[in-house]
Image (cartoon, coloured by chain):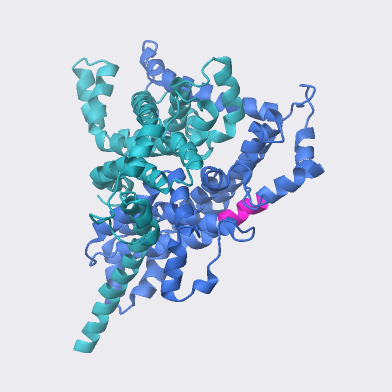
């Protein structure tokens, strides 16, 4: 009996934890290795990469180099501008469209829904030749506006699709009651928005991450020094300074840490958003 | 005899608000996504030299002209290898992790889940450089680890050799994106009603049997979604190869995939001028490949599953 219990405990707890821990090490090791070594002097980075920084080996020289040589503060500001403006645009414009699609059964509604959903499966990158032609004919090459417009178009399909399905679940009575009270359709839209707030938060993260991390469009539409984003800036900086390991490790850490902190703060909501369909 | 339900028709004032709600989204999406896609498709039928309409001439050049076809077929083949490695490594491991995480009796699953998803959030550029450093013979972290385990004789500069670079890059990408199949499978597994599983356990089934006979068939729709997402993502990949190996996708084009070929063709490289028309042709073929994938998924997978469920 107790042998059987032991065996059960083994298969139900020990094996899963072992597998998960092993994979945890595989997933975390590279990230931690880079962050830890970024705080070490050059000699210590090479002599003992696996050691944590001690008082003897601690050094910020990499960070100093990055701060002096690269325009990271400006890249950071550019990424932030593009991401924040795009998110706001996508959420406002997308929520309005999602509301119209979920609320009014006008002729052509399902067809318009399919048209707007095409962009979920078709990557916008495939239209790059056309996008560059359009952006240059509008005189927007090397502007953050170009990136914002393209990313807004990229983010809209998923936003509309997800918000539409959440808005459909908002009880009809609520909206009808407001209509009886004489509320305008715009007022009713304002009523529905707070109800789908959790979905809006999830969509915001899913739209934000690919924009922040994108290399393709900054490289093609806005490669100028003034409009460089963090991702493009890091890519070019790292390419130039391959031999300065302190600087490389420091810039990698600088590029990672903001995202990791944000992720750890919001991970609960984010993961709840992903698994929303299942856990209710 | 049944009559369809009739909707009473009311004459209402012209619905301006519907237009106001829809216009901004439709305009931005059409102008910056659909129009450029169509314009790009149109360009693929235009000659780079004369600017006139040439039918499928660009496609013919890409498939058969000696200057182009080697690169094109090479990139296509490499892209399929890249995709296959993801399907065979990323998705099964993602499924395994999800299966373990979704066990209700297991503790600390929240912590595992949060940390395992972390690499997925980071930029491909960062990931590419991190692994370049780790695998570099100069730093010797990978080599040191292999010496520790006693297999140092197998160490090679994997990111520099012609036959190992592509699989190595694919595995780096797998390492980063494993969080996506893990989360999707995890959500699907959590959605399975407890009663179904409990009943099987009461009947004396093992966890292994329960997983493959009950849980897995129930999450088949998610298996399809993961498959098609992997396909679309891989045939649209670019950032990792460009970061680690540059636009020339070396050594000797062995890591060239459709995304890097598209970039080089469209933007040019050291010895070759950019060619928007041929670039548009490459993009059109990528679009076609993705559409075929999506169609196969919708007809061959989703439909069949729906019939089973019905």
**Image spot of residue A112 (x, y percent):** 48, 27
Magenta extent:
B76-83
Q: Residue furthest top?
A: B13
The hue in which chain B appears in the rendered picture of the protein:
blue
Question: Residue at point 41% right, 64% down?
Answer: B216
Confirm whether the magenta stretch covers residue B81: yes
Which residue is rendered at x = 26% and y = 83% of the image? A7
- Return the x and y of residue B128 as percentages of the image width and height: 47, 49
The residue located at (54%, 37%) in the rendering is: A122
Residue B306 in sight here:
no
Q: Is residue A196 left or right of residue A126?
A: left
Query: In which quadrant will I find the N terminus of chain A?
Result: bottom left
Magenta residue check for B307:
no
Provide the major secondary structure of the magenta segment.
helix
Q: Which of A263/B5 is in front?
A: A263
Q: Which chain is cyan?
A: A
Query: Residue A151: x percent and y percent?
Result: 45, 29
The percent coordinates of residue B259 (x first, y second) are: 59, 42
Decide: is B194 above or below B76: below
- Dividing the picture into quadrants, the one containing residue B66 is top right
- Quadrant in the picture for residue A56: bottom left
- Tell whether B238 sits left or right of A198: right
When the figure is inspected, residue A179 is found, relative to residue B162, above or below; the finding is: above
In the image, is B176 to the left or to the right of A272? Answer: right
Q: Which of B120/A184 is in front?
A: B120
How many numbered marks are there?
0
Q: Along the horizontal axis of the image, is B258 left or right of A218?
A: right
* Residue A248 shows in the view: yes
């Amino acid at each position: 009996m107790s042998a059987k219990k032991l065996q059960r405990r083994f298969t139900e707890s020990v094996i899963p934890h072992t597998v998960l821990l092993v994979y945890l090490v595989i997933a975390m090791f590279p990230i931690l290795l880079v962050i830890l070594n970024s705080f070490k002097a050059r000699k210590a980075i090479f002599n003992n990469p696996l050691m944590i920084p001690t008082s003897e080996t601690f050094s910020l020289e990499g960070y100093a180099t990055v701060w002096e040589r690269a325009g990271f503060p400006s890249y950071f500001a550019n990424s932030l501008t593009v991401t924040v403006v795009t998110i706001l645009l996508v959420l406002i414009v997308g929520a309005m469209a999602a509301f119209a699609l979920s609320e009014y059964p006008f002729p052509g509604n399902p067809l318009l829904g399919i048209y707007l959903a095409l962009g979920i499966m078709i990557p916008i990158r495939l239209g790059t030749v056309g996008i560059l032609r359009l952006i240059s004919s509008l005189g927007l090459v090397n502007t953050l506006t170009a990136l914002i417009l393209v990313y807004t178009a990229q983010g809209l399909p998923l936003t509309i699709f997800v918000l539409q399905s959440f808005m459909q679940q908002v009880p009809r009575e609520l909206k009808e009651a407001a209509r009886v009270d004489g509320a305008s359709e715009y007022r009713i839209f304002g009523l529905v928005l707070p109800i789908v707030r959790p979905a809006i938060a999830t969509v915001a993260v899913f739209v934000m991450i690919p924009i922040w991390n994108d290399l393709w469009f900054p490289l093609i539409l806005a490669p100028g020094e003034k409009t460089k984003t963090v991702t493009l800036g890091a890519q070019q900086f790292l390419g130039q300074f391959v031999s300065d390991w302190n600087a490389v490790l420091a810039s990698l850490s600088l590029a990672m840490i903001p995202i990791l902190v944000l992720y750890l703060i919001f991970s609960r909501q984010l993961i709840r958003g992903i698994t929303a369909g299942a856990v209710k | 005899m049944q009559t369809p339900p009739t909707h009473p028709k009311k004459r209402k004032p012209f619905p301006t608000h519907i237009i106001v709600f829809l216009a901004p989204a439709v305009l931005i999406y059409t102008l910056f996504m659909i129009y450029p896609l169509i314009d790009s498709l149109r360009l693929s039928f235009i000659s780079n030299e004369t600017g006139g309409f040439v039918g499928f001439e660009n496609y013919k050049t890409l498939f058969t002209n000696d200057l182009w076809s080697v690169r094109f077929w090479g990139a296509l083949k490499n892209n399929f290898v890249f995709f296959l490695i993801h399907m065979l490594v990323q998705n099964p491991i993602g499924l395994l992790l999800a299966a373990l995480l979704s066990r209700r009796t297991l503790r600390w699953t929240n912590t595992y889940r949060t940390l395992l998803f972390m690499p997925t959030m980071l930029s491909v550029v960062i990931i590419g450089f991190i692994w370049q450093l780790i695998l570099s013979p100069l730093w010797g972290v990978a080599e040191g680890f292999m010496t520790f385990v006693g297999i140092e004789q197998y160490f090679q500069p994997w990111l520099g050799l012609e036959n190992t670079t592509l699989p190595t890059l694919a595995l780096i990408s797998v390492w980063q994106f494993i969080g996506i199949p893990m989360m999707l499978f995890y959500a699907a597994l959590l959605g399975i009603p407890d009663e179904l599983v409990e009943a099987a356990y009461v009947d004396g089934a093992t966890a292994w049997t329960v997983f493959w006979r009950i849980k897995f068939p129930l999450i088949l729709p998610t298996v399809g979604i993961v498959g098609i997402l992997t396909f679309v993502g891989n045939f649209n990949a670019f950032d990792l190869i460009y970061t680690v190996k540059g636009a020339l996708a070396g050594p000797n084009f062995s890591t060239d995939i459709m995304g890097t070929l598209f970039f080089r063709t469209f933007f040019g490289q050291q010895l070759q001028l950019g060619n928007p028309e041929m670039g548009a042709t490459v993009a059109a073929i990528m679009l076609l490949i993705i559409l075929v994938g999506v169609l196969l998924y919708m007809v061959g997978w989703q439909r069949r599953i729906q019939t089973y469920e019905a």
